[in-house]
Image (cartoon, helix red, strand yellow):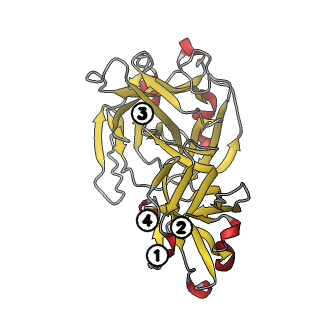
Amino acid sequence: MLHFHIFILVRFGEAHIWSVGKIRTFNVPDFLLDDFGNSVVSNECSGGDDGRSSSDEGGGIRRTTRDFPPAHFLFKVEGFSFLAKTGVEKYDSDVFEASGKKWRLSLYQNGDGKSNGSGFISLYLVIEETENLPLTWEVHVSFRLFVLDQIRDKYLTIEDANGAVKRFHWMKTEWGFAQLISIETFSDTANGYLIDDCCVFGAEVFVMERNCRWECLSMVKQPDDNTIIFKMEKFSKLDKKYYESSVHTIGDSKWKLNVYPKGNVKFKGKGLSVFLELVEADKLPPKRKVYAEYKLRVRNQINDNHMEFSVERWFSATSVNWGYPQFMQLKLLHDPSKGYIVSDTLIVEAEITLISEVKRFP
C-alpha cells in the first residue's frame, strides 16, 4: 500500500503545496538566507557535453554542502522507485516564481541519456511563460540546484565551478546538470538522499538584471578652451572685497576666478589673492571629486615675464576653491615698471592643463 504524506514548510510566511500522485513541492520565500556555512564535499567532476549541462563550458561542477534550505523552491518526491518505473522520461514540476520570472524543474529520474546522463539523476532549470516576450528576449541567471541529505539535514549544493552566468533565450530555455548525482550514490541509503523511497530537490535562481550603468573617469590633458581670462579694468578704482570672473566650462565642469585686489584674511593690505573655484560643486554626487592641474597667472603686459604659479588639487563640495592668499605683493603688483598693471588694467588668468572628467551612461 502506498502512503501519502503532506509536508508544510513555513518560513515566516505561507508555504505553497501542490501534489500530483506522490509528488510534493514547496515554494520557499525569497528572503531566506543564502550561502552560509558551506563545506566542500568535492571540487569538480565532469558534466554532460550537449550544452544542456551547466558545466559544458569547461569549468566543471562544484558540489558543496550547507545547512540552509534553498531560497526559492523545494520539490519532494515520495515513492521515487515507482516514478522511475513508470517509463516516463522526465517529470516537470509545477511553475514557481523567483527573481521576477517563472520557472520549473525538469527531473530525469533515470538520467538524461541524450546528454550523457545515463547512470545519473539529471535535473534542469526551465524558464516558463515567455510567450509574450519579444523574440530577442534574454534572461541572465546564476542558479544552484540541491539534493537534501535527510540523515544529516544538509543540502548537497550543485553549481558551476566557475560561477558562470547562464543566458536563457528563445532558443535555449533550460540549463542544468545531466550528471547531477550518480544513481548509485543517490540510491545508497547511507548517503541520506533517498530515505524510505523519498527524496527532496531544490533550486535557487538569481536573475542578473541588465540595468548596468557605466561610469568612465578620464584624465584629460590640455582640454579645449582651457584658459579663463579675467580682465579687470579701472583696477585702481575697484573697492569691493573681491571680484569674480565669468563662468567658463572646461571639461565637464564649470570654473571661475576669484580675485581679491587688496588681499584676503591675514594678507589683507599686503598682497593680491587669487583663487580658482569649482562652480556648483554642491551639485556634485556624494564623494565625487574633480581633479585639476592649472596655472594661476598675472599677465605681464610689457613682456612675457608673467607672475605664474602651478597648482595640483582635487576639488569637491567641501573644497571648492584653491589658490594663493598672497599671490604677489601689492608693492610689486603696482610698480609701473613691472608691467602687471597697464592703462589701469590687470589681467589674471587660470590655465587648466589637466582635468578629470566623469561620464555616465546610459
How far is disc 2 from disc 4 in space, using C-alphas? 36 Å
Asked whether residue 83 is in view, the answer is: yes
Q: Mark 3 or mark 4, which is nearer the start of the sequence?
A: 3
Q: Position of residue 175 (x, y in %)?
A: 49, 25
State yes or no: discs 1 and 2 in contact (Cβ < 8 Å): yes
Indicate which label's residue lies in the foreground, 1 or 4.
1
The disc at residue 282 is 4
Q: Mark 2 or mark 1, which is nearer the start of the sequence?
A: 1
How far is disc 1 from disc 2 in space, using C-alphas? 9 Å
Q: Mark 3 or mark 1, which is nearer the start of the sequence?
A: 3
State yes or no: discs 1 and 3 in contact (Cβ < 8 Å): no
Dot 1: few (<14), some (14–19), or many (≥20) neighbours within 10 Å? few
How far is disc 1 from disc 3 in space, using C-alphas? 101 Å
Q: Which residue is the site of mark 3? A: 79
Q: Which residue is the site of mark 2? A: 344
State yes or no: discs 3 and 2 in contact (Cβ < 8 Å): no
Name which quarter of the figure residue 205 lies in.
top left
Residue at point 44%, 56% (across, down): 247
Q: Mark 4 or mark 2, which is nearer the start of the sequence?
A: 4
Using the image, determine if residue 161 lies above or below residue 121: below
Quadrant including the C terminus:
top left
Q: Mark 4 or mark 1, which is nearer the start of the sequence?
A: 1
Q: Is residue 247 left or right of residue 191?
A: left
Q: Which residue is the site of mark 1? A: 237
SS state under label 3 = loop
Using the image, determine if residue 6 lies above or below residue 83: below
The residue under label 4 is which amino acid type? Asp
